Image: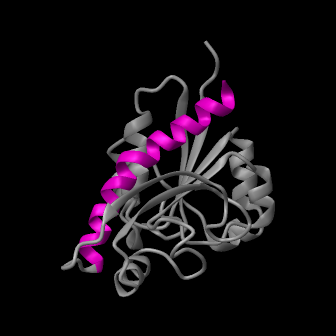
């Protein structure tokens, strides 16, 4: 039986998307989550607790580790094949993007190309969607490139923006879609690439 694809997850916060990815691949023989990393310390991010319930320790890395290539070296040394960004808010350096070109995905909480780019993350996105009077929003899975949120779109799912929506209510609906579809999109991209 072939060796499974080794997937790394990088996150910055609560880790709910990381947990949905871990859950999806828990019993997979094709894909193994081999690394979970967070650029915030345990006291500032819930992901550490969340991944423990899957028997996975989240590893802390600093922005300097990312910028100066130490994180990239760690992933390459550990035989990581693919990277999934899951609520990861730091800019990914060019050499890191090149090392995982065509093998790094991100999830964004809007229907790109709308409401993407620098500063467009979390509640900022949902607030902007409501303020713009949009009738729908959603989530996008896209390839990671050197520019924020500009990689080719892999998958989108949409939901209605309701008249009485608050950014928090909209965020909850979009996040539910991310949990449902992001792990499947990762699996589909890996399956296509390795077919």
Q: Which of the pair 128/160 is nearer the observer?
A: 160
Q: Is residue 184 visible?
A: yes
* Image coords of residue 99 (percent x, y): 78, 51
Residue closest to the far top: 1
- Image coordinates of residue 32 in percent, x first then y, are 53, 33
Would residue 56 be counted in the magenta stretch? no
Q: Is residue 195 above or below residue 10?
A: above
Q: Is residue 92 above or below residue 48?
A: below
Image coordinates of residue 70 in percent, x first then y, are 74, 60
Of all residues, the one furthest to the bottom in this rendering is: 131
Write the residue at 60% across / 76% down.
117
Q: Is residue 11 left or right of residue 167?
A: right
Could you tell whether 172 is left or right of 24 in the image?
left
Q: Main secondary structure of the magenta part?
A: helix
Residue at screen point 32% across, 69% down: 171
- Residue 190 within the segment the image draws in magenta: yes
Location of residue 44 by image quarter? bottom left
Furthest residue toward left: 164
* 138 w.r.t. 130: above or below: above
Residue 75 rendering spot, x and y as whole percentages: 69, 48
């Amino acid at each position: 039986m072939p060796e499974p694809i080794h997937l790394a997850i990088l996150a910055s916060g609560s880790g709910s998307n990381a947990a949905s990815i871990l859950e999806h691949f828990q019993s997979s023989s094709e894909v193994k989550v081999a690394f979970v990393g967070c650029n915030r310390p345990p006291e500032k991010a819930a992901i550490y607790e969340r991944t423990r319930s899957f028997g996975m320790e989240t590893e802390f890395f600093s922005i300097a580790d990312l910028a100066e290539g130490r994180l990239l070296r760690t992933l390459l040394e550990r035989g990581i094949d693919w990277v999934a960004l899951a609520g990861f808010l730091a800019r990914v350096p060019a050499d890191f993007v090149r090392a995982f070109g065509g093998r790094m995905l991100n999830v964004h909480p809007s229907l790109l190309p709308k409401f993407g780019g620098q500063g467009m993350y979390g509640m900022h996105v949902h607030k902007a969607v409501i303020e713009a009077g949009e009738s729908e929003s959603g989530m996008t899975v896209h390839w990671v490139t050197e520019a924020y949120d500009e990689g080719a779109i892999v998958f989108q799912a949409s939901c209605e923006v309701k008249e009485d929506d608050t950014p928090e209510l909209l965020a909850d609906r979009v996040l539910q879609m991310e949990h449902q579809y992001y792990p499947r999109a990762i699996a589909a991209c890996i399956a296509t690439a390795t077919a």
